Image (cartoon, grey):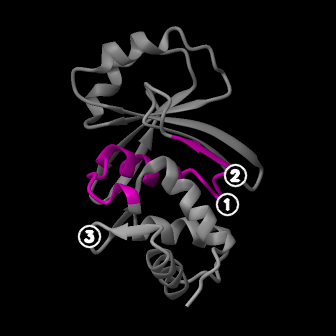
Amino acid sequence: MRYTITPDQKYILSILKETKAMRKSQAFTLLHKLSDSKDESYILRCLDQLRHMRKIVWQSEDLFTLSQLWAVPADAEVLSAIDIMLDLTEIRIPAISSSTRPYTLCFLSEQHDGIGDYAVIAVHPGEEVTITTNLRHINNDSTTIVFLLQNISQAKQIQTSLTHFFATYADGNYHYFSEN
């Protein structure tokens, strides 16, 4: 059987090219934002066809990656950044990059009222000052930085004039807050 890559499959692959791995639930959310009619069975068929075309492989029951990366473990921080990206996106992701350090993931987020420009930085305890220092030379007022913290107390140690807010993960959800 010969498959043709659909626009939805191209969209998944474009995100996967940057993130290297994705959970099935993230693919569902990604496509469901484009249209409510894209239900779980449709998305599973899309992923199954990509697997048959040898574009993706499953690393576990819920996690897939590009075929050439089958032996590379998924980056937990990037998977968390994908969750944040999906939380901040109303429609679609027009552009994404995971190769711009110190950022874990950069993306444009299409909203009903325009485009948002975001960068997620995963912050490990003890790295707050180093990250803040590295951001001093960045002069980009259009990007909103989301600091992904392991605990809320880290927020006090992050000082930047760049537009930003914080995210933590607890009780199965991401919680967002500003320093105020």
Using the image, determine if residue 103 lies above or below residue 109. Answer: above
Q: Are marks 2 and 1 in contact (CB under 8 Å)?
A: yes
Residue 99 falls inside the magenta stretch: no
Q: Secondary structure at mark 3?
A: loop
The quadrant holding residue 39 is bottom right
Q: Which mark is residue 110?
A: 2
The quadrant holding residue 121 is top left
Return the disc, 2 or 1, that comes first in the chain's sequence: 1
Nearest the viewer among 148 and 49 is: 49
- Hey, which residue is sitting farthest left in the picture? 126
Q: Secondary structure at mark 2?
A: strand
In percent of width and height, residue 1 lies at 55, 91
Q: Secondary structure at mark 1?
A: loop
In percent of width and height, residue 144 lies at 58, 31
Using the image, determine if residue 3 lies above or below residue 99. Answer: below
Distance between mark 2 and mark 1 Cα atoms: 5 Å
Residue 26 in sight from this viewpoint = yes
Disc 1 designates what residue? 91
Amino acid found under the numbered disc labelled 1: Ile
Disc 3 designates what residue? 60
Q: Is residue 121 left or right of residue 49?
A: left
- Residue at image x 43%, y 67%? 56
Nearest the viewer among 17 and 106 is: 17
Q: Read off the magenta span.
A: 68-97
Q: Is residue 84 left or right of residue 171?
A: right
Label 2: how many Cα within 10 Å (few below 14, some 14–19, many 20+): some
- Residue at image x 44%, y 76%? 51
Using the image, determine if residue 29 lies above or below residue 178. Answer: below
Amino acid found under the numbered disc labelled 3: Ser
- Hey, which residue is sitting farthest bottom in the picture? 1
In percent of width and height, residue 153 lies at 26, 28
Residue 66 in sight from this viewpoint = no
